[in-house]
Amino acid sequence: MTRIVCISDTHCQLNKVLIPDGDILVHTGDLTYRGTIQETSKELFELSKHRDRFKAIVLVEGNHDFLGERDPHTMDQMCKDNGITLLRDSGTIIEGLSLYGSPYQPEFCNWSFNLPRGQALKEKWDLIPEETQVLLTHSPPMSILDCVEKFDTRTGTMGVDHVGCADLYNRVTSLKQLKVHVFGHLHFNHGTVKIKDTTFVNASNVNEQYQVVNSPIIVSI
């Protein structure tokens, strides 16, 4: 069994997250808050402190991680210098598992790695190889751990709204070998759910007030 430790959305507070031992440590984006080179350097170094405890550390970027979009060469080199595997519409094999990662999400304000819903995002998800066993995205698929709080003006009460990506849902549910799909982005819906043979993980470590309140999630496959 391979023990995967899942974290996400640490927003410059990685040092506050108690990370247990495992085989692979995955971070699914929003390592930083403003995505400056200073923030990125500091947080990558913080992430690299766990190298001796894992066989690999794997990162995808999120909508706050501007450096990766504005200067991908620098981001790539900084990850290499810190011994971190960065997946940006790319894959790797670790412990015999096929991993693939992508940072994109449906357009949301003026953040990084935004794409409009529809064809542009579908083209990204179509790149995911059929043999993928562990998928890392920043964005959740539609209807799976993708809720945000929403005020219902008709009833005067708080409810929830699903804001994940429908095209991502269509792609992940078509992948026959997919065992784990890890994401974050939406702080409200931390947790896991298993659908058929796939475990879905919203690994966000912060709540909607950007406070570190959620523990890492461990998945063994």
Image: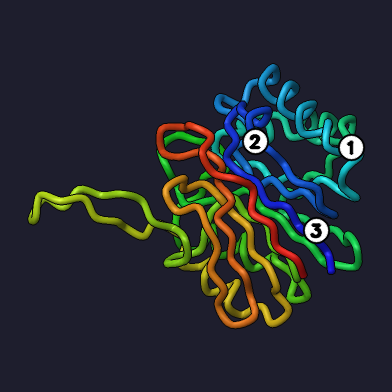
Q: Tell which of 201 and 110 is nearer to you.
A: 201
Residue labelled with disc 2: 17
Q: Tell which of 202 and 52 is nearer to you.
A: 52
Residue labelled with disc 1: 83
Horizontal side of residue 24 vs 107, given as left or right: right
Q: Quadrant of residue 117?
A: bottom left
Distance (Cα) linking label 1 and label 2: 20 Å
Tag 2 or tag 1, which sits nearer the N-term? 2
Residue labelled with disc 3: 91
Q: For the residue carrying disc 3, how many other residues have a C-alpha within 10 Å: few (<14), some (14-19), or many (20+)?
A: many
| Secondary structure under the numbered disc 1 in the rendered image | loop
How far across and down, in percent of the image, does residue 181 sit?
64, 64
Distance (Cα) linking label 1 and label 3: 16 Å
Tag 3 or tag 1, which sits nearer the N-term? 1
| Secondary structure under the numbered disc 3 in the rendered image | strand
Q: For the residue carrying disc 1, how many other residues have a C-alpha within 10 Å: few (<14), some (14-19), or many (20+)?
A: some
**Residue at 64% in and 21% down:** 36
> Which label belongs to residue 67?
none
**Residue at 45% in and 65% down:** 142
The answer to whether the residues at label 3 and label 2 have Cβ atoms under 8 Å apart is: no
| Secondary structure under the numbered disc 2 in the rendered image | loop
Q: Quadrant of residue 52?
A: top right
The answer to whether the residues at label 1 and label 2 have Cβ atoms under 8 Å apart is: no
Under mark 1, the amino acid is: Gly
Under mark 2, the amino acid is: Val
Tag 2 or tag 3, which sits nearer the N-term? 2
Look at the image and tell me in which quarter the C terminus lies. bottom right
Under mark 3, the amino acid is: Gly
